[in-house]
Image (cartoon, rainbow, N blue to C red):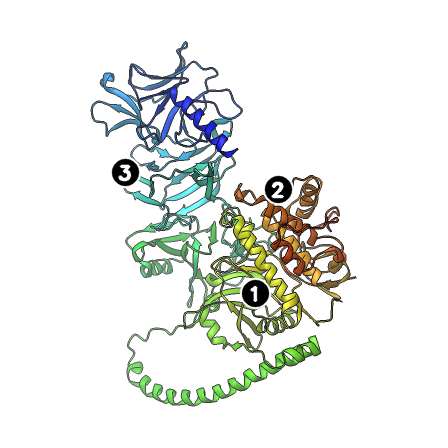
Amino acid sequence: MYQAKSILQSLLMILFFRFSISTDSITLTQPVKDGDVLVSGGESFALGFFSPRNSSNRYVGIWYNKVSEQTVVWVANRDHPITNSTGILSLDETGNLVLRESTQPFVFWSTNVSGVENNNDVSAQLLDSGNLVLFQGQNREVYSWQSFDHPSNTILPGLKFGIDKKTGMNRMATSWESSGNPGIGEYSFKIETSESTQLFLYKGTTAVWRGGSWTGHGWSGVPEMTQNYLFNVTYTDNNDEVALVYLIRNSSIFSRLVLNESGKVERSTWHDADRRWIVFWSAPKDECDGYNHCGPFGLCDPYKSGTFECDCLPGYEPRSPQDWYLRDASGGCKRKVGTEVCKEGEGFVELARVKVPDTSTARVNMSLGLEACKGLCLRNCTCMGYAVADISGGGRGCVTWYGEMIDTRTYSDGGQSFFIRVDAEELAKYSTNKPKSSHQNPFVIIGLPVIAAGLIISMLICCYIRKKKANQSKREIRLGFSDSLKSMEGSFMEKDFGENVDLHVFDLSTIVAATDNFSFSNKLGEGGFGSVYKGKLLNGQEIAVKRLSQGSGQGMHEFTNEVTLIAKLQHRNLVRLLGYCFHKEEKMLIYEYLPNKGLDSFIFDQEKGCLLDWKKRFLIIRGIVRGLLYLHQDSRLRIIHRDLKASNVLLDADLNPKISDFGMAKIFGSDQDQAITRRVVGTYGYMSPEYAMEGLFSVKSDVYSFGILVLEIISGRKNNSYYLENSVNLVGHVWDLWKQDKALTVVDSSLGDAYDAREILLCIHVGILCVQESATDRPTMTDVAFMLSNRETQLPTPNQPAYIFRQLNYGTDSTTASASCGDGSVYDRSITTVYAR
């Protein structure tokens, strides 16, 4: 079938070129009529008449000649279509390209160039870059007009995107009205200049997304645009122009930047083997990309796990706490009550890896360095913050902000540092207590060495005493864990774990240094029991620090539970706990650092989801199976995780899955099958019905959660965010499609057609078996492992899943389940105080 399709396409292309013009030029004697096709010298692009999808109107356009799917990159008569096939594109007596009907004088489109001296020397040529150019005279390097100066919805390599300061021309992209109408749509994508040059996407006159200012490496709002980018990028900002030109490094690759009709800017490349365009970057792509999403002085952080993405800049608080509680941050933030800048002790807090605020009203001085910029801002009481203008080559230039600062957001990688002005009290919260400069004070030169000698001797004595006390303290902590766990888990813990919690005990000072005093820039996310920070030990080892909230009533229980459990669990598909820190009210768990974060950050993200093909997703599913099988059967005690979900499956550098977060896990004896609890914990959308309703949990509770997770991995959708007319959630939708033999329609679109249909159907079948309403009907993880390893095995017919027809009161943005369930939480956050009836 595939070969036949290819042969048919080849024949059509041969027939198509039979009507092509052999030259790449238009002259006074050789126009282009409807039905003719002009082909560039290298045969990369073609020009001719075309009709968009579902339209009979005719337009003159340029498209890729070697791409089997007609992809138009430029349109001449966008808002003036010809309604018949009598169109002709020719050179007229004024030396301009004009588009007319052959029988009518009306001009549908023209290059409209004035001042042509001798029209006998005029010609037009389609270059292999996709640029249609108009020549006058013998100098063919000087264009009277070019299509690259008038882009449609596509920015091609070599096109000078930006502003000609002499003429005021702004070469911008504008969307089509629709897929069937190339007329100028409501979205525009362009460079703007004021004090600082920025990139903007508009809907009409309203800013939709800001690509940020130019940092020397790229746009601050496009962190993917680095020196290792796919293109050679040239940025020019002088008295004549401000423009960006990119040239693709590999000329055999077709790549384009398109502003589509729905208001998305997409970068895609043509994959000839798959015969389709593949999008590898787009914007806007998350809530924080929305322009001014968190209001004035707000900071948007899309990586905050399970919480509202908006926060206030240091030194600020929500202007309307009630609105923020309802997740409306449009009102932004204001200075904290009782604080005032421009007083002694004030300073700046550094926010790393951010898109700096909108620079439309900022001031730029390219002659200043970073320290001089700080001084400039500090001397002006109206200056709110500063940043380096150009971060390349060690940094140069100074940007300072005055008045409201809007549209600031964080990135996991990329961006730049921004320094926000705060008062002395706020500065102390972020201070690392660095010593002040001595300025060569005589006391320092003469007296300090004498005092230092005495201090060194005292310190040596103190270190000996501290070390002795620390060893005793560690022993007491271990004993404390043992006592606490014995009381919680009874004889099972006493028998198998006893006092030997074989983990490293970290000093608080070590963790503070590793995380730069828990700096905001090192914050990886936030969960139900506190925040997680990235850290780096003195030996260079990267760690993840889970800092439990001091206000959490369940903190000690989960902390003790997780330390004791993970210390004894050794499996390649379980996250590795390196140690813990326990100091007064501080309780911290130190894990191995996994650079790819949670599985949810991939499967629920349209862009990153493309990085997980089906082969990798299937390996992740099987890795989760191995991890659960170890917990349920192969470890010394049977362990029920009770909070298995996408965000609790972390991915290492090779995208191998590791189950994490054992704060809610329960331990069973080898002869114990199930238990009942009044304290139901877990996450809405993943909890089995018997557990959520009756508090009854067993290994089948984890099996149910696993089934939900499998369906989410296949579909790229959250269970509770998938609402359709006849089904409440993803499970219900899959069940409906399964009964209609249409289950493959649920497959994540980012997978395209590159997957094993039998393998996916097998996984969907297993997933449905795992989410059946009755726990006794669900397979064990041993059964699941066998099913996924043996394709020819006849699987049982599944019964109706749970939770598919009952109308629920919560969704992705809900905060409670129902009045009878106590305190709930947002979907994908753990529930900790729900009691079963």
Q: Quadrant of the C terminus?
A: bottom right
Whichever of labels 3 and 1 marks the residue nearer the N terminus, that label is 3
592 vs 333: above or below: below
Q: How many marks?
A: 3
Nearer to the camera, 140 or 418? 140
Tell whether label 1 touches label 3 (CB within 8 Å).
no
Q: Nearer the viewer, mark 2 or mark 1?
A: 2
Q: Residue 635: x and y, percent?
A: 63, 70
- Please give the label number shown on residue 574: 1
**At 52% across and 78% down in the image, what residue appears?**
505
User: Is residue 616 in sight in this rendering?
Assistant: yes
Nearer to the camera, 394 or 633? 633
Distance (Cα) linking label 2 and label 1:
31 Å
- Residue 571 falls in which quadrant of the image? bottom right
Q: Nearer the viewer, mark 2 or mark 3?
A: 2
- Residue 829 falls in which quadrant of the image? bottom right
804 vs 379: above or below: above
Identify the residue under disc 2. 744
**Callout 3 crowding tier (Cα within 10 Å): few <14, some 14–19, many ≥20:** few
Identify the residue under disc 3. 240
Q: Residue 253: x and y, percent?
A: 37, 39
Tell whether label 1 touches label 2 (CB within 8 Å).
no
Identity, as a three-letter code, of the amino acid under mark 3: Asp
